[in-house]
Amino acid sequence: MAPVTICRTVPPRSDRSEPLAPRQQRVREWLAALALAAIAVTALTYPLVPHMGSMARYDGDAKFGLWNVSWIGHALLTRPADLLNANIFFPHTGTLAYSELNLVAGFLGFPGYAITHNPFVALNSAIAIGLFLTFVLTWALVRRLTGSAGAGLVAAMAFTFCPNIPSRAGELQLLMTFGIPLVFLAFHRFHERPTIGRSVALGAALAVCGLACAYYGLYTATALAVMSLVMADRRRAYWAGLGGAAITILLILAPVVVPYTAARRAVSAPEAAPADRLIEWAARPADFLTSPTVGDAWLRPAVQRTLGNSTDPMFPGLIVLALAGLALTKERHRTAAAYLIVAVFAVWAAFGPRLLLYTVIAKVVPGMALLRAPVRYGILVSFALAILAGFGAVRLIRGRVAVTAALLLVTAMELTVWGGPGTTPGWTLARMPTVPQAYRLLASLPQGAVVEFPFPYRRIDFHRHLVPMFWSVFHWQPLVNGYSDVIPQDFRDIAVPINAFPDPASFEILRARQVRYVVWDMDGYDPASRERLMARFPPYAAYLQLLTTDHDVWLYEIRDYPQKPGGS
């Protein structure tokens, strides 16, 4: 007698590799992931979200990110065709291309800027949306690989708030980590069924990753190449599809890369990072054992004593390491092994020229020569370990909600950042300063080029031009000042003599640049320098009209220019 098979509905197991979850369960899982992503971003970046319009990170180089994302919002609202013609280094054009464009962050922050015209909202909303996407996409990736929604949540928490993030909170493009899980999610979909549509989706994902952050785009591309080889099979469609993805990347990036490259060539921008910078910005052993988080602060003294100081803290956390270790001891999954290989590859490359692998990659991969910080491969180490932690979490969760909640809680607690004594856990942000009347008035005046003094003239002080760039987000007049990765030679040439303004030579410099408004931040002058400045004013009183001196920021309008030397 033949055996009888009894068909019955079996509830899907959350630890199976491909659970056949009913539609309602999938919807509930997605809603839970979206809700937890919003809660986690709000809590672990506090006070960024609740004080989105009044607090931000804008100290030092962080001013550049705020200016960049705000400029994109302003340009899209006013003159989209002039997006690359940012308001710095006037009269140069294409100046947004003098550094990384940050187009994706700008688009993420655009809705908030369009509604409020508040630069802080533009910056903070871009960061919050970017981290939200990182959480959701990492969850979706691990959910797909392990079949466990709970494991996906743990992995998402581990990667979204990994130590790389708070340690680089002032560098906007380095917070756009969502492109990394997006690329690998697209790859695994393609690997399962290498169709033309999934090939195009993979190429598009990698293009978005590169537009969000050039470092992450190129470094993720090399890690994806490793993954593609490890996961390779003999299907012709697989290899053809990888070629199709490469073509897709070129087609999407060409409209951005071509004008970007042209703008940089117009000012003879360097085409490769100096070799000494690659060594300076390579990882050190201490980096992988140091973390800015509360849970791992106890490691720092011992690491400093034995290995020295860390410049880029990247220790992934004990919980992540424990879960990843569990995956490697229990899991016999080809994909888990592939992510281990990616982690090893990323660690090796992060050490830069010292261990040779980075040098080989830089010679093979187009665009790599422009990058100067091999240490940023560390984000891929954190990512790969977070995915492995997801595989390990499956072994503990097995459908138990309480275990998932406990793992999420301890992971979040370990990864929380702390500003130090007298502060609360969360990111270090500062309140929006009072905007001096000079900049508010400039916003209402007819368009004209602005120069702001003092005008830093030493190369090591050029970053101080970020201050007038920061204030320019409140008026958007063309600005002679500027700071970026590329500094035009004529800017360097005028940096010393322009500080003698007002005098005949500096008047000619301003005349050549069609400058209409002059700002002096008098707090930037010591008493002796201030006295010398005031002594230069009387002969030129007929040419300069004082508009305001609020908050010791003086705004003048040039009413006319003195006759050129020689009487012409």
Image: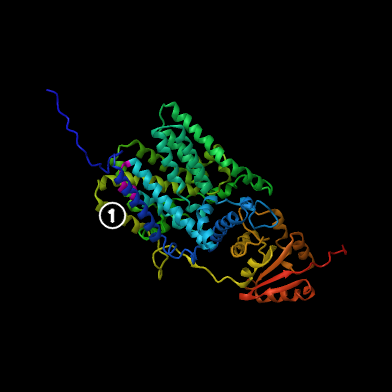
Out of 66 and 459, give the one closest to the viewer. 66
Q: Residue furthest right?
A: 567
- Residue 419 lies in the magenta stretch: no
- Residue 153 lies in the magenta stretch: yes
Residue 564 is situated, as x and y percent measured from the top left of the image, at 83, 64
Out of 231 and 449, give the one closest to the viewer. 449
Residue 15 is situated, as x and y percent measured from the top left of the image, at 27, 42
Report the span colored magenta.
Answer: 146-154
- Residue for badge 1: 405
**Residue 466 falls in image quadrant:** bottom right
> How dense is the environment of label 1, judged by Cα within 10 Å: few (below 14), some, or many (20 and up)?
some
**Residue 525 falls in image quadrant:** bottom right
> Is residue 544 positioned above or below 110 on the image?
below
Q: Report the residue at 72% width, 65% height from top.
A: 516
Residue type beneath disc 1: Ala
| Image quadrant in which the N terminus is located | top left
Residue 358 seen by the camera: yes
Q: Report the residue at 32% width, 41% height from top.
A: 146
**Which secondary structure is most common in the magenta stretch?**
helix
Residue 212 is situated, as x and y percent measured from the top left of the image, at 51, 49
Out of 386 and 32, give the one closest to the viewer. 32
Indicate the secondary structure of the residue bearing disc 1: helix
| Image quadrant in which the C terminus is located | bottom right
> Is residue 119 positioned above or below 229 on the image?
below
Is residue 17 rendered to the left or right of residue 432? left
Q: Report the residue at 19% width, 36% height from top.
A: 8
> Is residue 248 positioned above or below 382 on the image?
above
Residue 506 is situated, as x and y percent measured from the top left of the image, at 76, 65
Q: Residue furthest top?
A: 1
Is residue 252 rendered to the left or right of residue 299? right
Residue 324 seen by the camera: no
